[in-house]
Amino acid sequence: MKILILGTAYPLRGGIAHYNALLAKHLGARHNVEVITFKRQYPTLLFPGKSQQETGDPGVAIASEQLIDSINPFNWIRVGLQLSKRRPDLVVFKYWLPFFGPCMGTICRLIKRGTSAKVIAICDNVIPHEHRPGDGLFTRYAFGTVDAFIVQSSTVERDLLSVIHQPRYQKVAHPVYEIFGTAVSKEEARRRLGITAQRVVLFFGYIRKYKGLHVFIDAMKLVNRSVPVKALAVGEFYEDDKPYREHIQQAGVEQSLQLVAEYIPNERVAEYFCAADVVVLPYLSATQSGIAQIAYQFDKPVIATDVGGLAEVVIHGVSGFIVPPNDPQQLADAIVKFYQENLERSLSVGAKQEKRKYSWDVMVEAIEALATDS
């Protein structure tokens, strides 16, 4: 098949760019794949981070064309007509934010008008974490072009069924990221990062309220009453960082919690995961999390909250622990239990076993089935 993947891709950065690179790589082993990305993904005034550009190693080198302007309707028409002339058999786009609904909906409509192409949407979210006016309208407009969907958790499946009547879809787990290089020893990773602590817990990823960093801060105050632990909170702030820094001081965890407030280039991600004993996802809400898949790539157990599809990925007592959301005491108890009962080895083995479920081959086969079924 001739397949077009539309969405974030190198030279843009972030988890969706990484996902699309891996998707292109694995689909490209069987099909003719072209990746079409943004020349303007977000207007500067609307982008909460410091930069939209990847500054380090792309991880997976793929060719992409920067054609799409997310806020220019004339561009959408031009790009849609241009891509229609390429006569694709299939168009695939990731859907995670209604902001992109008008853009993707228009481009896909124009492609389908001039071809027999099918459209598949891989849904990270159907209903966004942070609601804005027009979300429902934009989502329905985008989905009006879609022939079939892939969802990656039961939460997104329920949301899709609440928006679309009897959609064609498959539920496929979010595959493991393979983009961050090979593991290094824990000792070497800690040496590179200048960490001398014996116990290290990692919070990783861009920081917004729903990620629950404030809960992690309160939990660490409780943890250190029982067992000395070094906490790493690593990621770029997508909101004001001042309240978090004040919270760290008020909780008295300045010495035990190290804040690395920056985007981590692909080639350095392994250092942080390999340095950690366990990864913590204290989310207040979620659908799924790519961070869990990065943790599994490095055979790291995960302590996560029972929101969205996290409990489908983190198997309680096997590859980590599931705790109630927004509950610092329960999160702290799980971290303390992890260390006091010496569970790192057994849960790491569980994480390694769970990793086998999250194959890109399964994702490729699902896309092929949805594309070829009538």
Image: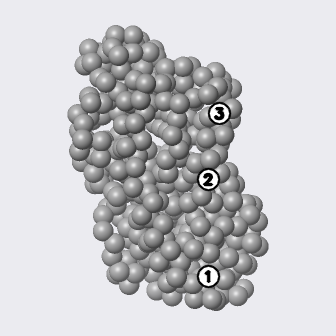
Q: Quadrant of the rendered structure where residue 192 is?
A: bottom left
- Please give the residue where the numbered disc 3 appears in the rendered image: 161
**Residue under numbered circle 2:** 309
Q: Earlier in the sequence, mark 1 or mark 3?
A: 3
Q: Which is closer to the viewer, label 2 or label 3?
A: 3
In the picture, the quarter occupied by the C terminus is top left
* Residue displayed at 41% across by 69% down: 298
Instruction: Classify 273 as above or below 55.
Output: below
Q: Nearer the viewer, residue 4 or 362?
A: 362
Q: Give the residue type at disc 3.
A: Leu
Q: Residues within 10 Å of mark 1 (few under 14, many from 20)?
A: some
Q: Secondary structure at mark 2?
A: loop
Task: State which quadrant residue 271 falls in.
Answer: bottom left
- In the displayed structure, 332 sits above or below 57; it is below
Camera-nearest label, 1 or 3: 3
Q: Secondary structure at mark 3?
A: helix
| Residue 231 placement, left or right of 114 | right
